[in-house]
Structure formats: C-alpha cells, structure tokens
Amino acid sequence: MSYRILICYHTASGNTGWVTGQIARQLGELGAEVFMQNIACQQDAPAVDTFDAVGFGCPVMGFRPTFAMTDVIEKLPVQHGKPAFIFVSYAAVCASSLWMLAAMLSRKGYRVIAAERFRGELSWPVARLTGIIASKGRPDERDLSKITTFSRNIYAGLKSHREQGSGTFRRVPFAFFNPLSYMALLNKAAYLRFIMGKKRVDQSRCTRCGLCQKQCAASAISLNPYPQFNESCIGCWGCYNICPEKAISTFLGPRWGYAARAHYLDASPAHEQKP
Ligand SMILES: Cc1cc2nc3c(=O)[nH]c(=O)nc-3n(C[C@H](O)[C@H](O)[C@H](O)COP(=O)(O)O)c2cc1C
Ligand code: SF4
Ligand code: SF4
C-alpha cells in the first residue's frame, strides 16, 4: 500500500529545507512516493488533488508561520477531509504557529494528522547582532529521531485514514497564556518588511547570479540588471542571508548575516542531505 505525498515548503535560509528533505527521505523509506514543492521556485498553487496527503513546512517569523506559506494556503482549493501534516522550524519562540497553520488548513477542509516543530539556528540578523543565538548548528542529526517519530506518525495517520475512513485528528492547541500568540495574530508582512529596513545592493559585489530572485518566496525581487525589491517583500531576510557574495545590506552591513544553508534550499532527497 503506497501513498502519494506532496510536501509544500518554504525555507528562507535552509533550515526548514533540511528538515523537509529528511522527512521526505523517511517517508520514502516507509514506502511513500514523495514530491516536494519549494514555494519560492514553483509559485503556482500546488496541485493537491492527485495526492493522498499534503505536508506544509515553513519557518516561524514574527511568532507565526511565514506569510509566504500562509499566502499559499489561502489560495488552495477547498478539500473534504484530505489528510495534512504541518511542521515549522523555529529558533526559540514558536508561540501558536502550528495552531495558526492547523486552523487555516482546517478552514480549507484539511484534516491535520500530525504536527511538529523543530529547532533551527536563529536566522534573524537583528537578534544575532545582540548575541541571542540559540541552538547553534540546528537542525542537525540531533533532530533525526524526532523526524523519524514524526514521519512514522504521518504514515500511521495515513494508514488509519485509508483503512478506517478517518485518521486520527491531531489537535493543535492555541497557546492562550503566551502573549506572543496574540502579537502573531496582529502581525503583518508590512511590519516585518519595515523592521528589515531598506535593502541595498552593493553593485561592486553582486554578480547578478539570480539566486536571491529565485529563492524569494514573495516574488519581491527583479534583476534590472541588479536586484530591485518591491512591496511584496515579507521581510524574511532570505536574500540578505543567502547572497553568496554578501552583496545585500540593510541598516545592518552584510557581515551580520546568518551563514545560510544555501545547499538545503533545495530539499530534494536526491540532494545531499548531510547535516
Ligand atoms: C525575520 C525573522 C523573524 C523570526 N522570528 C522568529 C520567531 O518569532 N520565533 C522564532 O523562534 N524564530 C524566529 N526566527 C528564526 C527562524 O524561525 C529560524 O531561524 C528558522 O529555522 C529559519 O528557517 P529557514 O532557514 O528555513 O528559513 C525568525 C527569523 C527571521 C529571519
Ligand atoms: S544573490 Fe547576491 S550576487 Fe546573486 S544576484 Fe542576488 S545580490 Fe547579486
Ligand atoms: S526580498 Fe524580502 S521576501 Fe524576498 S527574500 Fe528578500 S527579504 Fe525575503
């Protein structure tokens, strides 16, 4: 008995990409046929109908799932009980991010069968500047057993969904006592863009390689001939962090960037997935 699974993911600096690749690999080893859609590179709404289940993974930014991911979910067609699983990577404060994803998917007619969060190294340069750097090196092999358990739960949930017609529904509670859960509800992409500040490109460094444009999940960058940024930017710092030439700066110079795992932006299991 095999399952066709789509994992739709957003990764601004590679942490979620690494987790996604590992989940895909583990589900593949359990016998599933797994496809991945990096929402930055394939921005059409995912064609979910041919899949038995859909996974959604993204970083936590501003105490909530990234706007790039929630925008994709908003555009999905309504389903009738299709199984879904959700995961986020976060540095320290997940707040109610999983609840937000679960609530959105439930409104879209999905049945969330598994949810998990994974620690990632802090990719927000402003906090790195102040020395609050959590979980250095994560995600890495320390997270593999959690990923294995998560993948097995997904597979078991799919099995019971197919055999009994209804898989176990995974309740994701709202963190009522965490004030950041409420801040997350008030957050807007424009605030994160504002906090990031005006982006500048050092033309003497930029090679016009196009990586920032390709990996911007908000379609906010055009090469003209150097990167130019528009108002759809969600302030994820992805371009700043991943530019191999360190050509992008804001009010912060490029040296404060997170050493993004650019090789994990493509989460394909065929891709090398060493931590
Ligand atoms: C603008 C911005 C805001 C962030 N906000 C949060 C947050 O609210 N809580 C948290 O735990 N981590 C936060 N982070 C850290 C990321 O969630 C974490 O580094 C994640 O692993 C990045 O995933 P990626 O490498 O797939 O982009 C933030 C990072 C950025 C760039
Ligand atoms: S990733 Fe860096 S070098 Fe490449 S186009 Fe963007 S700014 Fe220029
Ligand atoms: S332009 Fe904005 S949304 Fe796009 S990668 Fe850069 S910070 Fe993220």
Image (cartoon, rainbow, N blue to C red):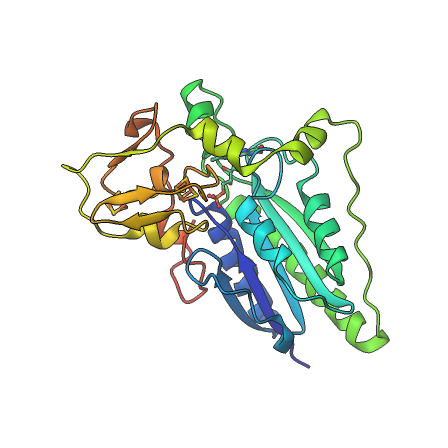
204 is higher (above) or lower (below) than 216: above
Q: Which residue is drawn at 78% across and 67% down?
A: 81
Horizontal placement of 217 versus 249: left or right?
right
Along the viewing direction, whichever of 71 and 129 lies nearer the viewer: 71
Residue 176, by quadrant, is top right
Q: Residue at x 62, y 31 (%)?
A: 93
Horizontal placement of 227 versus 259: left or right?
left
Along the viewing direction, whichever of 62 and 6 lies nearer the viewer: 62
106 is higher (above) or lower (below) than 53: above
Q: Position of residue 130 (x, y in %)?
A: 44, 18
Residue 90, by quadrant, is top right
Along the viewing direction, whichever of 199 and 161 lies nearer the viewer: 199
Q: Residue furthest top?
A: 130
Placement of the N terminus among the 4 image quadrants: bottom right
Residue 117, by quadrant, is top right
Q: Position of residue 237 (x, y in %)?
A: 41, 37
- Where is ligand 2, by quadrant? top left
Q: Residue at x 40, y 21 (%)?
A: 129
Q: Position of residue 112 (x, y in %)?
A: 74, 58
Q: Residue furthest front?
A: 231
Horizontal placement of 252 versus 134: left or right?
left
Answer yes or no: is residue 145 visible. Answer: no
Answer yes or no: is residue 199 visible. Answer: yes
Q: Where is residue 252 in the image (x, y as percent from the top left)?
A: 34, 24
Q: Residue at x 17, y 46 (%)?
A: 207
